[in-house]
């Protein structure tokens, strides 16, 4: 079953200037039937963390 997703909140924290190729890794921290909490981290070529994000999403049934 496909769902619609609405963003409840999204927070970005820029930690350092980004240089070169960037990599982003994200994961669902906790998923429920109606709300999902997720986080992500962006690192530069040297593995230095340049940005972190947290988000809360509302899952909506498709009509």
Image (tube, helix red, strand yellow):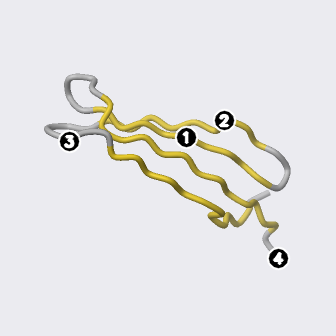
Residue 38 picture quarter:
top right
- The Cα–Cα distance between marks 4 and 1, rounded to whole angstroms, is 28 Å
- From the viewer's perspective, is residue 52 above or below residue 2? above
**Which of the two residues, 29 or 63, is positioned nearer the viewer here?**
29
Q: Earlier in the sequence, mark 2 or mark 1?
A: 2
Report the side of 48 relative to 32 (left or right).
left
Q: Earlier in the sequence, mark 3 or mark 4?
A: 3
Label 1 near label 2: C-beta < 8 Å? Answer: yes
Question: Which of labels 2 and 4 is toward the front?
Answer: 2
The spot of residue 62 in percent (x, y) is: 78, 71
Residue, disc 2: 29
Q: Residue at x 67, y 57 (%)?
A: 57
Which dot marks residue 18? 3
Residue, disc 1: 39
Residue, disc 4: 63
Q: Residue at x 75, y 60 (%)?
A: 59
């Amino acid at each position: 079953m496909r769902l619609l997703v609405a963003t409840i909140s999204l927070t970005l924290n820029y930690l350092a200037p980004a240089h070169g190729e960037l990599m982003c890794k994200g994961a669902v921290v906790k998923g429920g039937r109606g709300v999902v909490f997720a986080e992500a981290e962006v690192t530069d070529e040297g593995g230095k963390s340049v940005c972190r994000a947290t988000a809360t999403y509302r899952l909506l049934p498709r009509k």
